[in-house]
Image (tube, rainbow, N blue to C red):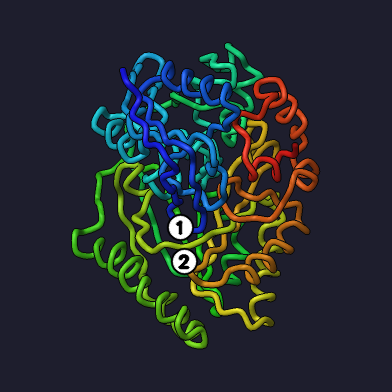
Amino acid sequence: MRTTTIENGTAWRNWAGNVTARPVRTPAPASADEVARIVTAAAAEGLTVKPAGTGHSFTAAAATDGVLIRPDRLTGIRRIDRAAGTVTAAAGTSLRHLNETLAAQGLSLTNMGDIMAQTVAGAVSTGTHGTGRDSASIAAQITALELVTADGSVLTCSAEEHPEIFAAARIGLGALGVVTAVTFAVEPLFLITAREEPMGFEQVMAEFDQHVAENEHFEFYWFPHTANCNTKRNNRSAGPARPPGRVSGWVEDELLSNGVFQAACSVGRAVPALIPGIARVASRALSARTYTDIPYKVFTTPRRVRFVEMEYALPREAAMPALHEVKAMTERSPLRISFPVEVRTAPADDITLSTASGRDTAYIAVHLYRGTPHQAYFTAVERIMTAHGGRPHWGKLHSRDAGYLEGVYPRFGEFTALRDRLDPGRVFGNAYLRRVLGE
């Protein structure tokens, strides 16, 4: 099968528009063998190789001036194994297609993040996660993966086969090779009841540990310049399914969360002084609601307002003190913040460079509308996060380097040693990896 290739430096941009690359060529292989040929040919020419998904990372993790592999033809569900409780998807398969296919087969992932636009390989390679007491990261649900390494080898990695590679490559940052397929653990389709409820900031702070302990999935949003939060508690349900009404669901998820919010962000970017007033109105606009549906329809939401984001993973016990500091910082500064701050949790896992590796974790994510100057706000928040031993999300904006990251990841040296073994010539290197992993 012939690989589709676009030559002569066609520009590539990420979803947020803050990263641009101009690779020499952008092949679109349809198999692991084609990927292997692309990698070996590029290495022989002295070119670097980076796979790019849908560009939902805010960092330059996928940027290259060499060969940019596109996922357009490396798609589809390869196998559903009901006896083993697994599904294998080609790397470029979107999370939307994966979830819709599983649901049609009466199956589901245990947990997922809040958007479905990403490819499966892009989502796991950067550590995409949802929120959960017992599960959160998509990568933690991987049972095997297929990886093309720098010498053109095609490896199947699992806890039994190449276990040291499996431990790291589940969140591999594109540094160890090109992921061409991912096998996930799945379970019979189930229902989740979502309870969304406004709550005061201090009440959420005081009850955070209780909410995390009592709910399978808890998250909340705090609206800067207010004392208002919106909470979401998701728990498995015996049913029956009671999805949001067509009209009420559209009002909440499209009109308020996307349409009106887009307009409010545009006004706030043009006239920052209006943002506190807009925030007070916006934080009261979403009403309490309860509904029951299949997992991906509860966990995910449409995101049509484009933004830039920074997120840090903290030891869970440090999260509320850190958030108090963020609130105090915004109150005493001239900053005007139009986006709510998102807080989620994850249990400790055993993935080498997972943001939850070895410790129970809480995530604090800050956003700003695309085109709004973000440096001052993100720098101030990052200073607070790093003071608490925070680990930056690999696909979201941050300024940390290998010297810092080695200090917050006990197994950092394991990863870099494995990288030295699998890719000594840095075929998969780029400026982002040089910063976060070192030379």
Q: Nearer the viewer, residue 272 or 41?
A: 41
User: Residue 232: percent from the left, percent from the top?
Assistant: 44, 58
User: Residue 216: percent from the left, percent from the top?
Assistant: 49, 45
Against 264, residue 94 (above or below) is above
User: Would residue 408 appear left or right of 222 to someone viewing this image?
Assistant: right
Against 323, residue 166 (above or below) is above
Q: Nearer the viewer, residue 307 or 332?
A: 307
Cα distance in 3D space between marks 1 and 2? 7 Å
Q: Residue at x 41, y 15 (%)?
A: 84
Residue placed farthest to the left in the image?
A: 246
User: Would residue 178 appear left or right of 257 to someone viewing this image?
Assistant: right
CB atoms of marks 1 and 2 within 8 Å: yes
Q: Amino acid type of disc 1?
A: Ala
Q: Secondary structure at mark 2?
A: loop
> Which residue bears the numbered disc 1?
16
Q: Residue at x 46, y 63 (%)?
A: 307
Q: Residue at x 63, y 31 (%)?
A: 351
Q: Is residue 155 visible?
A: no
Q: Is residue 181 visible?
A: yes
Q: Amino acid type of disc 2?
A: Arg
> Which residue bears the numbered disc 2?
370
For the N terminus, give its image quadrant.
top left
